[in-house]
Amino acid sequence: MTERIVIVGGGTGGTVLANRLSERLEPELDSGEVEVVLINDGEKQYYKPAYLYVPFDKKDVSDATKPITDLLPRDVQFRVDRVESVDTDRKQVTLASGGGLAYDQLVLATGANLAPDNVPGLAEGGHHFYGPDGAEALKEELAEFREGHLVLSVIGVPHMCPAAPVEFTLMADDWLRKRGLREDVEITYTYPIQRPHGLQSIADWVTPIFEERDVNVKTFFNVESVDPDAQRLETMEGKELDYDLLVGIPPHEGSDLIKEAGLGDSGWVDVDQHTMEAEHAEDVYAIGDAADVPTSKAGSVAHYEAGTVADRIATRIRGGVPTATFDGKTVCFIETGMDEATFVSFEYGSEPTMREPSKPIHWAKLGYNESYWLTARGLI
Amino acid sequence: MSESISPDETVDSRGAACPGPLMDLIGKIQDAEPGTVIELQTSDSGSKGDVPEWVDEAGHELLDTVERDDYWSIYVEKTD
Ligand SMILES: Cc1cc2nc3c(=O)[nH]c(=O)nc-3n(C[C@H](O)[C@H](O)[C@H](O)COP(=O)(O)OP(=O)(O)OC[C@H]3O[C@@H](n4cnc5c(N)ncnc54)[C@H](O)[C@@H]3O)c2cc1C
C-alpha cells in the first residue's frame, strides 16, 4: 500500500517541505511505497518579503513570483486545486474540483490571510504593502506624497513578519530625507500594546531610533475603525488620530478550513510547538503561518519547521520513533533605512541580541531576497 | 472573592508568550457586548502587569487577578 503524504499550501513552508521529503524519502518515492502530493490553490508562489521594497520603487511585484512547478522535485505530485475541508476522522481532504483525497499524513501549510474588512473603513481609507495590489497602489500614493502626516499603524497582531512595519517606517523616513521631503512630512507609528514591538529587545532598540529620527510613537493603540472621509483613526482606547496617508497593517486570519476541521478555534492550527503535530488530530501537522506557535509568522520559521516535519514524517514512515524537534528558531533581517539593516535570531523563550545596523547586512538581505528561490527548492 | 466571579467567556492563553495573552484579550473584548465578564488565563508573568495597564487605558474594569497552580486568571468586565 502506498503511503500518501498530502501537503496543503505551496508557499514557503509547503515547498521547502516537499523538497525535504523528496530528499529524505528518495528510495521510498522511487519504489512507489510513498507518494507526496502538494496542493495549492494557484500555479504560482509569491515571495512576500519583496513587497516591502515595491512602495519605494526598488522592486516589482513580478520579481516576487515563480511557478510552483519550478520549485518542486519531479517525484512530488503537484495539483492546482483548493482544499475545501479536512475530515481528520476519515483522513481525507475535499477538493474544490470535486471529490476527496485520502491521506496517511497531512501537513497544513495554508499561511495567513489578510482581513482588512474586519476594521470598518480600513479598506477604503488605508494602504498597505502586504499584498501585490496593495504594494503597487502604495507606490503610486507615495510617489505623489510630498507633505502631511504619514501614519504607519499596526492594526492586527499577530501579522506576518513582525519586523516589516518597523522596517517600512525607517525606510520611509530615510527615503523622504533623501528626497528632501522629510521636513514636510510628519511620521507616526502606532502599536497595539504598551511598547512599539512585541519583542521587548526590539522595542528597546527601536525606541531611541524612532526618537532620533523624529518618528512619533503611539502605543496601546488598537484601531477600531477608520473614517476615510475625515481621514481619521479611532481606537478601542477612545483615541483619535488624523492622517493624510495611512499605511495600515491589516488584521490577519487563519483559515476557516482549520476552524471547521476542529484543528484550532482561532483559525490557526493548535500544535505542539516542538513537534508541529496537531493537538486535536492524529497524523496531522501544521507549519508556517498556519501553525499557532509563540514566535513570528516568518518565512524562516516556516523553513525550519518544514525541516523538522520532514524528518519526523520520514522517520515514522520507516518505522522509527521521531526525535527531530523545532526549538523556535527565528531569523529576521530588519532594514533600518534604504541602505542599512540589522538582523535578529532567537528561539522560544529567548530574546534577540540587537546588533548595530550596517550596509553589509543590508546587502545580505538583498542577496537573500535574490537567492530565496534556492531556499524554497530546499537547496539552502 | 474570586471564587464568586463566574465569567461569561474564558480566553485560554496559557503557553502563549507576551504579548499574545493581551492581544487575545483585546480581540475578545472587541467582539464582546458591554457588561461581559471575561476570564483571561495566562502563564506569562509579564501579562499580570501589561493586562491591567491596558484595561485601565481602555477604560474597562479589572475585577480580580487570581494565582492558580501554574497560571493566573485575570477577570475583566467590558464597559461601554
Ligand atoms: C511585506 C512582507 C514582508 C515579509 N518579510 C519577511 C522577511 O523579511 N523574512 C521572513 O522570514 N518572512 C517575511 N515575511 C513573512 C513570510 O512571507 C511568511 O511568513 C511566509 O510566506 C509563510 O509561509 P507559509 O508557507 O506559511 O505561507 P504562504 O507562503 O503564505 O503560503 C500559503 C499557500 O497556501 C495556499 N493555500 C491557502 N489555503 C489553501 C487551500 N485551502 N487549498 C490550497 N492552497 C491553499 C496559498 O494560496 C499560498 O500559496 C513577510 C511577509 C510580508 C507580507
Image (cartoon, rainbow, N blue to C red):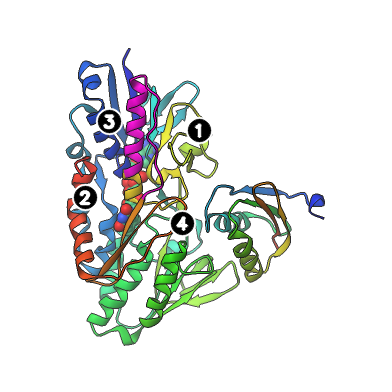
Kindly report the distance in space between the C-alpha atoms of the residues bearing marks 3 and 2.
19 Å
As shown in the figure, which amino acid type bears the numbered disc 1?
A: Ala
Task: Locate residue A239, reporting x and y percent.
Answer: 57, 74
Q: Nearer the viewer, mark 2 or mark 1?
A: 2
Kindly report the distance in space between the C-alpha atoms of the residues bearing marks 2 and 1.
32 Å
Task: Locate residue B1, reporting x and y percent.
Answer: 82, 55
Instruction: Identify the secondary structure beneath mark 2.
Output: helix
Give the side of residue A6 with respect to residue A257, left or right. Answer: left
* Residue at which label 1 appears: A261
Quadrant into which the N terminus of chain A falls: top left
Q: Earlier in the sequence, mark 3 or mark 4?
A: 3
Judge whether A307 appears above or below A244 on screen.
Answer: above
Residue A116 visible from this viewpoint: yes
| Magenta-drawn segment | A304-329
* Residue at which label 3 appears: A21
Dot 3 alpha-carbon crowd within 10 angstroms: few under 14, some 14 to 19, many 20 or more: many
Q: Nearer the viewer, mark 2 or mark 4?
A: 2
Residue A123 lies in magenta, yes or no? no
* Residue at which label 4 appears: A251
